Image (cartoon, rainbow, N blue to C red):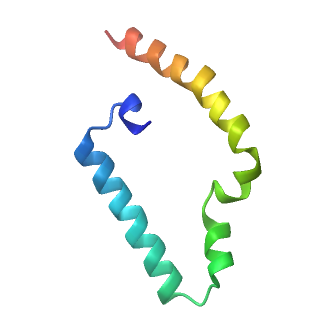
Amino acid sequence: MAEEFGLNEEEIKEGLKTMLIGSVELLFKSEFSAEEVLDLIPVYPLKNSEETIRNFYDTKLTTLYQKLLEARK
């Protein structure tokens, strides 16, 4: 998905690495429980709506992004 929004492989890897390191540090260096850390992840509370969100992404956001790319040309 990230490639569809213009990120190259190196940027994707670096972003994932940074998110994982931050999550692990928060989990082990804070006084939050594992459940509290998960609740801090913006999409975790939306897990039950994942299918709806994916559908919206596939049908709306991708189309909008493509239009923005075309407008920049």
- Residue at (62, 85) in percent of width and height: 32
Choose top left, top right, bottom left or bottom right for residue 33. Answer: bottom right
Left or right of 52 on screen, residue 43 = left
Left or right of 29 on screen, residue 72 = left
Tell me how many marks there are: 0
Residue 23: horizontal and vertical position, in percent? 48, 72
Taking depth in this image into account, of 11 and 58 the one nearest to the observer is: 58
Seen in the picture, residue 53 relative to 17 is either above or below; the reply is above
Q: Quadrant of the C terminus?
A: top left
Choose top left, top right, bottom left or bottom right for residue 39. Answer: bottom right
Left or right of 51 on screen, residue 9 = left
Residue 62: horizontal and vertical position, in percent? 52, 23
Seen in the picture, residue 27 relative to 40 is either above or below; the reply is below
- Residue at (76, 50) in percent of width and height: 48
Residue placed furthest toward the front:
51
Choose top left, top right, bottom left or bottom right for residue 45. Answer: bottom right
- Residue at (28, 47) in percent of width and height: 11
- Residue at (41, 9) in percent of width and height: 71
Left or right of 11 on screen, residue 52 = right
Taking depth in this image into account, of 50 and 43 the one nearest to the observer is: 50
Residue placed furthest toward the left:
10
Residue 38: horizontal and vertical position, in percent? 63, 69
Seen in the picture, residue 30 relative to 14 is either above or below; the reply is below
Taking depth in this image into account, of 71 and 63 the one nearest to the observer is: 63
Residue 56: horizontal and vertical position, in percent? 66, 28
Q: Quadrant of the N terminus?
A: top left
